[in-house]
Image (cartoon, grey):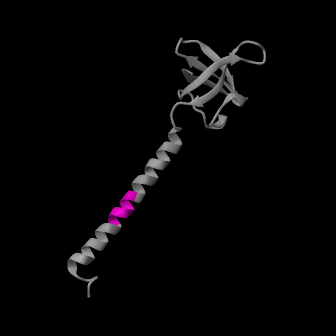
Amino acid sequence: MSKGTIKQLMDRGYGFIKTEQEEDLFFHSTSLEGVEFNNLREGQEVEYEKGQGRDGRPAAVKVKLTEAPAEEAGESEEADSESKEAGESEEAGSESKDATGDSDS
């Protein structure tokens, strides 16, 4: 698969990818795999196959992100760090009870 970067997104469900050869390649929202058009952002890296649009001109097909969307990745990292912190504070609390002997009496 070829790689490129989303150069421009249009409100009507299509956009353009800047290819590694510095060409602009059209893509339509129906050519996306594994991502919704509304979740795309300009500057994201994508993989695609070169095909033809309905008008016979070159177009990107089977377009997918090469990385997880930034919003989802950031949310999961925050959730992981919060759950780790909660686990550490629970462990610290149980250790202090054991050290004072409160839990054994």
- Which residue is rendered at x = 62% and y = 21% of the image? 49
Say which quarter of the image contains residue 57: top right
Is residue 43 within the magenta segment? no
- Which residue is rendered at x = 50% and y = 39% of the image? 70
For this orientation, the residue located farthest to the front is: 1
Q: Is residue 34 above or below residue 31?
A: below
Q: Position of residue 26 (x, y in %)?
A: 67, 19
- Which residue is rendered at x = 44% and y = 48% of the image? 77
Q: Position of residue 14 (x, y in %)?
A: 69, 26
- Which residue is rendered at x = 25% and y = 77% of the image? 98
Q: Position of residue 2 (x, y in %)?
A: 56, 19
For this orientation, the residue located farthest to the right is: 55
Taking the image as shown, residue 98 lies to the left or right of residue 60, namely: left
Point out the stretch of residues depicted in magenta.
Answer: 84-89
For this orientation, the residue located farthest to the bottom is: 105
Is residue 86 within the magenta segment? yes
Say which quarter of the image contains residue 96: bottom left
Q: Nearer the viewer, residue 3 or 15?
A: 3
Q: Nearer the viewer, residue 95 or 70?
A: 95
Q: Is residue 8 above or below residue 96?
A: above
Q: Position of residue 101 (x, y in %)?
A: 22, 82
Magenta span: helix, strand or loop, mainly? Answer: helix
Q: Is residue 2 above or below residue 32?
A: above
The N terminus, quarter of image? top right
